[in-house]
C-alpha cells in the first residue's frame, strides 16, 4: 500500500512515536510519503532520508510560543497569523507536489491536519494515531472535567474538530478511562526502541527536565535540598554545582539517567510521562499553563498513584514528592509494561481492512483493555 503519513511538529513526542510506526509499516513492504512540520521534520528526514520506499516532505504547521508561565496565547496567535501567507503558499506547493507524485491508498495522521484534509479531499481513509484524542473519545471523571470547565471543554472540542470522521482512532495511553465513541481503541504508549531496551537500575538521583526559565526558577529550591542529587536537562548550564549536575543533551545519557532515577521532575508532556511510567520511575509533573491535555495527563498520573502533579514547583511540593517516592514506586509496580507489538498489529489489521475496501469497524480484534491494563480507574465516571 501507499501511505501518506502526517506528523505534527509541535513537540518531539509525535515524531518519536511516528518513527516507530513508520519503521514498522516500511518493514511490511508499504511505501510511505511523510509530511511533517517543525523540528520533527529534521528528525524524521535524518532517519528516513536513505530509505528507498520513504520520502519526507516539509510542511508548515501551527506552533506555540512559550514563556516562563507556559503557553503565551496572544504571542502564539500573532506569530501564526503573521506567518500565515508564507505557510499557505508553501503548503499549497507541497500539496501539488504530493498529489502529482504520490497516489495514496491510506492516510495515517499523528494529530496532523494537512494529511487529514488531504485524505478527506481525495476520499482516502484516515487512521488517527495519537494520545490527545483521549480527551474527546473517552469519558473522564467529574473532577477532571470540573477542575477547569472552560479549558476542558475547549481542549475536548479542539481534539474533536482536529480529526472528524476519521476511519479509525488508535489512542495511546497509560491510563484507561471508558471509551465513549465507536471506532476507537485505547492502546499502550508507543515507545521508542531506546526506552524498550533500557533496564531499570535504581539509583539515588532525581532527574529534572524543564525548559531553561523553569530551571532557573527551581534552582534556589534544589540548592536547599542538599541530601538529594539532581541531574538537570534543559538548562543553559553545564557542569556540577555541589549536589546538582547540569547535563548537556544526549539521548543515550538521558535514557540512562531516566532508567536509573529515583524520580523525575518534568512537565506534563505525554511522551516522557509514559516513558517514566513504563520504566517504573515516579514523576512530579508540572503541566504548562493553558495546556489542558497536559493537566489531564498529570491528573491521571496522580490518580493512579504513579506520581504527583503541581501547578508550580514550590519547595513544599518538591519535598512532598521526595518524601512520597516509596509510595509512588509501589503503585508503579502494579503497572504492566508493554512493548509496541499490540499496537503495531492493530495498525496492520486496519491497513488490511482499508486495502480490502471494508467499512470502518466499530471495534478491532485486539480491542480488549483487560489483557494489558493492570490498574483500573476506580472512581465513578458520571454522565457528560
Image: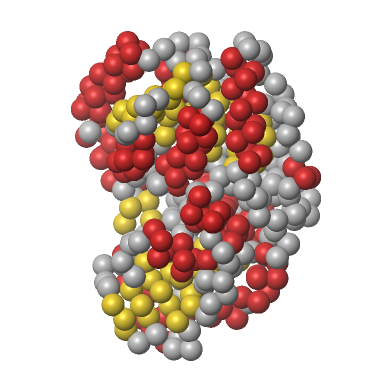
Residue 373, horizontal then vertical, whole percent: 73, 50
Residue occupying image coordinates x 41% and y 74%? 231
Q: Is residue 81 visible?
A: yes
Residue occupying image coordinates x 41% and y 80%? 222
Front one among 171 and 239: 239
Q: Quarter of the image containing the C terminus?
A: top right
Left or right of 303 on screen, residue 70: left
Above or below, 46 relative to 94: below
Quarter of the view holding residue 383: top right
Residue occupying image coordinates x 53% and y 77%? 203
Above or below, 260 relative to 188: below
Residue 291, horizontal then vertical, whole percent: 46, 49
Residue occupying image coordinates x 40% and y 46%? 11
Q: How is the image coloured?
A: secondary structure
Above or below, 176 relative to 185: below
Q: How many marks?
A: 0
Q: Is residue 308 visible?
A: no
Left or right of 107 on screen, residue 136: right
Front one among 340 and 83: 340
Residue 250, horizontal then vertical, whole percent: 35, 61
Above or below, 309 relative to 378: below
Left or right of 243 on screen, residue 133: right
Left or right of 378 on screen, residue 269: left
Quarter of the view holding residue 5: top left
Residue 252, horizontal then vertical, whole percent: 41, 61
Amino acid at each position: 500500500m501507499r501511505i501518506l503519513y502526517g506528523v505534527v511538529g509541535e513537540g518531539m513526542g509525535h515524531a518519536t512515536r511516528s518513527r516507530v510506526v513508520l519503521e514498522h509499516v516500511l518493514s511490511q513492504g508499504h511505501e510511505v510519503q511523510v509530511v511533517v512540520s517543525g523540528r520533527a521534520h529534521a528528525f524524521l528526514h535524518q532517519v528516513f532520508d536513505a530509505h528507498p520506499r520513504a520520502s519526507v516532505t516539509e510542511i508548515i504547521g501551527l506552533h506555540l510560543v512559550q514563556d516562563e508561565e507556559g503557553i503565551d496565547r496572544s504571542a502564539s496567535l500573532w506569530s501564526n497569523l503573521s506567518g500565515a501567507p508564507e505557510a499557505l503558499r508553501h503548503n499549497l506547493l507541497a500539496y501539488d507536489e504530493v498529489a502529482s507524485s504520490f497516489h495514496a491508498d491510506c492516510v495515517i495522521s499523528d494529530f496532523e491536519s494537512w494529511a487529514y484534509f488531504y485524505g478527506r479531499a481525495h476520499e482516502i481513509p484516515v487512521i488517527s494515531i495519537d494520545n490527545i484524542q483521549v480527551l474527546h473519545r473517552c469519558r473522564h471523571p467529574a473532577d477532571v472535567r470540573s477542575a477547569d470547565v472552560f479549558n476542558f471543554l475547549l481542549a475536548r472540542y479542539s481534539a474533536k474538530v482536529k480529526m472528524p470522521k476519521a476511519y479509525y482512532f488508535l489512542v495511546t495511553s497509560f491510563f484507561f478511562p471508558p471509551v465513549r465513541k465507536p471506532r476507537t481503541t485505547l492502546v499502550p504508549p508507543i515507545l521508542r526502541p531506546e526506552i524498550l531496551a533500557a533496564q531499570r537500575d535504581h539509583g539515588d538521583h532525581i532527574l529534572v527536565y524543564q525548559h531553561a526559565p523553569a530551571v532557573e526558577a527551581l534552582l534556589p529550591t534544589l540548592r536547599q535540598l542538599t541530601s538529594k542529587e539532581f541531574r538537570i536537562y534543559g538548562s543553559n548550564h553545564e557542569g556540577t554545582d555541589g549536589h546538582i549536575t547540569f547535563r548537556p543533551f544526549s539521548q543515550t545519557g538521558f535514557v540512562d539517567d531516566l532508567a536509573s532515577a529515583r524520580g523525575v521532575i518534568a512537565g506534563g508532556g505525554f511522551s516522557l510521562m509514559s516513558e517514566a511510567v513504563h520504566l517504573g520511575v515516579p514523576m512530579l509533573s508540572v503541566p504548562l499553563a493553558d495546556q489542558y491535555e497536559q493537566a489531564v495527563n498529570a491528573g491521571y498520573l496522580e490518580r493512579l498513584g504513579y506520581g504527583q502533579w503541581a501547578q508550580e514547583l514550590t519547595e513544599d511540593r518538591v519535598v512532598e514528592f521526595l518524601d512520597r517516592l516509596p509510595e509512588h514506586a509501589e503503585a508503579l509496580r502494579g503497572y504492566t509494561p508493554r512493548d509496541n507489538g499490540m499496537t503495531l498489529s492493530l495498525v496492520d489489521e486496519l491497513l488490511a481492512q482499508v486495502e480490502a475496501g471494508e467499512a470502518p469497524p466499530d471495534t478491532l480484534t485486539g480491542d480488549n483493555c483487560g489483557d494489558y491494563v493492570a490498574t483500573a480507574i476506580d472512581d465513578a465516571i458520571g454522565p457528560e
